[in-house]
Amino acid sequence: MPMNRAHRRLCSSEKWAQTTKDHIIPWTLDGLELGDDVLEIGPGYGANLRVLIEQVPRVTAVEIDRATAALLEEKWGDRARILHADGAATSLPDETFSAAVCFIMLHHVPTAAHQDRIFAEAYRVLRPGGVFAGADSQPGLRFRLLHFRDTMNTLDPAELPDRLAKAGFTDVSVDLHPATGGLRFRARRP
């Protein structure tokens, strides 16, 4: 997992899980219908996953780190399908999911090209009309300190709409949170 020890400790904490439940997921998904079968790309330690399984009938989580995927399987495998795979190459069938989501993980993807492959994969596995939604952090001093010797490749909000459109998405929107500066995006497969 491309995170330093302090970052791993934060992301596996109950405080982070509560922040995710109370703030990140509600803001990211406000007004969206996810449908009946959701793919979460990059669930990490499962803070988002444990909220999603309470909100939708079926959730599949794709985690690139083998050890973390095993932890997720142990903890949530009876309620969600957990796959150890790269979100850019899931081997999942075409047009399977009603929605695909990712929360505060894209900045851990080392290159823009790899992020773009994740966008293309989300498009491929979504049903027509399916929604792709996510949130990520934007750089600041505290964020940079947390990512010391850690992967940090933030999304440029001005470039993200074009990148999602190149993957095939329409109805793309990108917003910045007025208080935190975090980024939220939504897009639809036509």
Image (cartoon, rainbow, N blue to C red):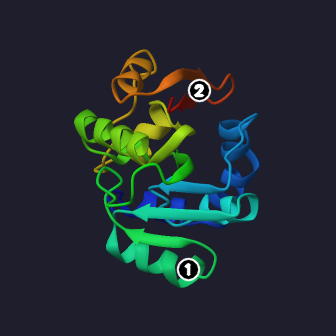
SS for tag 1? loop
Q: Which residue is mark 2?
A: 181
Q: Out of 181 and 114, give the one closest to the viewer.
A: 114
> What residue type is disc 2 on?
Gly
Measuring 75% from the left and 64% from the top, which residue is drawn there? 54
Which mark, by number, is residue 77? 1
Q: Out of 7 and 175, give the one closest to the viewer.
A: 175
Please state which of the two labelled residues, at mark 2 or mark 1, is closer to the viewer: 1
The image shows residue 112 at horizontal and vertical percentages of 27, 33
Sequence order check, earlier mark of 2 and 1:
1
Separation of marks 2 and 1 at Cα, in angstroms: 34 Å
> What residue type is disc 1 on?
Gly
Q: Out of 77 and 135, give the one closest to the viewer.
A: 77
In terms of image quadrants, where is residue 52? bottom right
SS for tag 2? loop
Lateral position of residue 128 relative to residue 31, left or right: left
Label 1 packing within 10 angstroms: few (<14), some (14-19), many (20+):
some
Question: Which residue is farthest top?
Answer: 158
> Which of the image's four quarters has the N terminus?
bottom left
